[in-house]
Amino acid sequence: MDALELLLTRQSSPRLVAPAPDESQLNTILSAAVRAPDHAGLTPWEFIIASGEGLDRLGALFVDATEADGGDATTMDKVRNMPQRAPMVITVVAKVVEHAKVPALEQHLAVGCACMAMQQAAFALGLGGIWRTGGLAFNRHLHQALALDDEAQIIGFLYLGTPAVKAPIKPAKSAQDFVRYL
């Protein structure tokens, strides 16, 4: 798959099954992530990988965080099962570094680029992925359970695996609908 085909046909895959990326594929996916634009070379990212029993541990952390926020039993059952939507979940974290020329927003954007690069690499390898966020990305109890400092921010949860069904290619949007020239 060439680069333009990847950029123009990339799809999210909400229904993912085993197998997860193997070690070689995961190394490629992570290598793509760390090639993301990174002003001043701050490497403001961390990738917390859950697969196998790690998915159960992540689900338990989701439950604990939801319970600490007063979630009801139905919500806790839902969040416990969220990591089971794929055979691998990568929690993508922006670990902001204090820097006079690189504000936190720019570092968050760099980590977002890293997340997109991982999803695109997975797609190029014949795998599927979907980048999810939701309230747990901002849940301070979850941040504490993952040993993140106060400046860190979960940018998203990248679910990876093999697409259960081939997603139809979405209709192309006209880029000109979103452009204005000065």
Image (tube, rainbow, N blue to C red):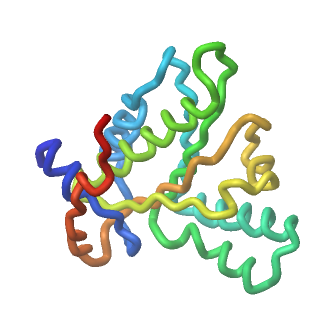
Q: Residue at horizontal 32%, vertical 62%?
A: 128
In the displayed structure image, the side of residue 18 where residue 74 appears, left or right = right
In the displayed structure image, the side of residue 131 where residue 101 appears, left or right = right
Q: Residue furthest front?
A: 182
Q: Residue at horizontal 75%, vertical 69%?
A: 63
Q: Residue at horizontal 36%, vertical 39%?
A: 27
Asked if 167 appears above or below 87 in the picture, the reply is below
x and y percentages locating residue 102 in the rendered image: 58, 20
x and y percentages locating residue 98 in the rendered image: 69, 20
How many marks overall? 0
Q: Residue at horizontal 61%, vertical 75%?
A: 81
Along the line of sight, the residue nearer the viewer: 158 or 169: 169
Q: Residue furthest bottom?
A: 74
The image quadrant of residue 123 is bottom left
x and y percentages locating residue 70 in the rendered image: 87, 72
In the displayed structure image, the side of residue 103 where residue 175 appears, left or right = left
Along the line of sight, the residue nearer the viewer: 49 or 131: 131
Q: Quadrant of the C terminus?
A: top left
Along the line of sight, the residue nearer the viewer: 157 or 19: 157
The image quadrant of residue 57 is bottom right
Asked if 79 appears above or below 77 in the picture, the reply is above
x and y percentages locating residue 34 in the rendered image: 42, 30
